[in-house]
Image (cartoon, rainbow, N blue to C red):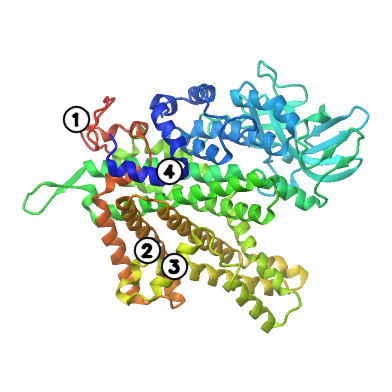
Amino acid sequence: MTTPTGHGLMVALDGPFHAVKDHWRSSITADDVVRDPSQSLPEARAWALQHLVDIANRGYAVAGFPGHPGSVAESVAHFEMMALGDLSLNIKAGVQHGLFGGAITNLGTSWHHETFIDDVISCELTGCFAMTELGHGSDVSSVETTITYLPDTDEYEIHSPTPSATKAYIGNAGQDGKMAVVFGQLLVGGTSEGVHAVLVPIRDSNLDDLPGVTTGDHGHKGGLLGVDNGLLTFDHVRVPRTMLLNRYGGVGDDGVYTSPIASKNARFFTMLGTLVRGRICVGSGAAMATRKALSIATRYALQRKQFRRPGMGSEVTLLDYQSHQRKLMPNIAKAYAYGFAVNEVSQHLQRVTDAVGQDPSASRELETRAAGLKAVLTRWANDTIQVCRESCGGAGYMSENGITLIRQDADIFATFEGDNTVLLQLVAKALLVDYKKTWGDMDLRGTAQATAKLLGGRFMERTTAGSTISRLVANAKVKPESERLHARGWQVEMFEFREQHLVETLARRMRAASKVPEDAVFDAVNECQEHMLEAARAHTDRTVLEAFVGGISQCHDEYIKALLIKICDLYALATIEENRAWYMEHNRIDGARSKAISAAVESLNMQLRDKALELVEGMGVPEAWTSSAMLRDAGGQNASGSYVRVHHLPVTEPAV
């Protein structure tokens, strides 16, 4: 049973999506979503497909599809909950409903929706999202696959002109997919209209390759064994003209190409922008898998004892050790911070969706936020899941205890839906847009004045809970020095200063790079790359903290709010501590302040240690879904006091 405090924290962290997530917890069992880690590759694939079909048939895959209940924002919440079960099932659903179904929804017209969506939802029509090629991954605009309009037959011909045009790493392509959304260069009358997407049947009802289509199976991977990733090549495969997903451009009945967006470049980025939900889902899914690992590791640390106290007293619980608190408590605080950030970006996604393209600036901001969160959350996931494994000692290395499967499956989240390095550069470039508008032919004084205006205005516009944050910043300025560390306004200012300084200095370097001879531009910009990545991380950290502040302001239970304030303190101070070398280099803190920050982090770790069980309950991971044998003692009782069936219980620490 969840404690009252744990439940209150869960309600606050779920935020506007509590009803959706609680429905999962109350009606989906571990048998529905938790896979046996010892399954072979064929067993894992069969399990993932069958359980995806089962869950879809129970109505858990309709949110976000036209004509079906549930919003686009709620579809992210559904994805998050599935990530708490098995990540193969999670990604199998992401490919089928998020990528394949999402492309039809966002890039297609009402005809495509009426013709295909119901079968996509039920998994009667299994599909792929064929964008990445062996020769081009992140550089989507340069994919080599061609989609050529044939006026004589009113068809499109899909072709892979070179070996490097082979579609690679494609989910559902290895075994189960019957149709693919294929991205390629659209050629009409000898003119390239840029990258478009077309629906191409790839297998028949017996799952045999159709004429002109060659599929390949990547086989065993480092994780996600339940997902059948594979290869696709096309040899002059023809499909009817109606199969092009032509919301943003296509050939009409008259055989002429038209588009509501005149610029090829703008059209390309508009098409990719409609797929931003997938990027949000990957980041949030990785964060939820990390919550599960933290839940397992923290529950274990609350029951596992090691070494006696002086004088042969009782043995010490792992979580009573300062070093163990250091491993887990700041990461629990980050799990809360990132949870509130995902809630906020999901609501932003809904607003942009509802605006139907009428607010381009909001769309660009959403793409920037989604890119930054995906990169930061997936990097944190890989690092933290490893910490969780190590914090459980040899027991953490046993498959039956749950963490190793999460670790191997979450690994690839840092790569798909956008390589993290590329995504952080995208964020940095977005931050530089307003600066670039000021460069022009201004002299140094004019540029400095325009830059100062940006730093004081639009650039530093607070994205959420703006009035609350402004009030907190003002209040912090009048607090005595001894109270500054725990003043939220001071913390916000520290985050803002780091972002502001990094982006401002990056803008100056990029302006200088823009003035070098053409043959030296690449090297000049390349020298700024690490600076770009750091500026993007600083921006994302700031927006996450703002989302946390906004989440706290929406909590009306005073006791829970007080706990959240303390968790937020830990997130903010731990993040500042991680970057304290930078702050010291830039004279924002001295040695004494640096030591005080570390002491404050350790104090918060100790204070929150007594609420550790409630904190992991608040992360919303159903206890049964942890499926971890080491959380059961000899009597079958786990850390929260409930009894569960014991599959296997090692009586000694496993030797590694």
Circle 2 or circle 1, nearest the eye: 2
Residue for badge 1? 634
| Front position in the image: 506 or 391 | 506
Which residue extends farthest bottom? 445
Residue 198: x and y in percent read 75, 34
User: Most extreme residue toward the top, as rendered?
Assistant: 206
Q: Earlier in the sequence, mark 4 or mark 3?
A: 4
State the residue position of label 4.
Answer: 14
Give the residue type that dot 1 points to.
Ala
Give the structural element (helix, strand or loop) at label 2: helix
Mark toward the viewer: 4 or 3: 3
Q: Mark 2 vs mark 1: which is more N-terminal?
A: 2
Amino acid of disc 4:
Asp
The CA span between labels 2 and 4 is 24 Å
Compared to residue 628, the image places residue 508 above or below, namely below
304 on left or right of 284: left
Residue 552 in the image, given as x and y percentages of width and height: 40, 54
Q: CA distance from mark 2 to mark 3?
A: 20 Å
State how far apart marks 2 and 1 are (Cα): 40 Å
Q: Residues within 10 Å of mark 4 (few under 14, many from 20)?
A: many
Quadrant assignment, res 458: bottom right
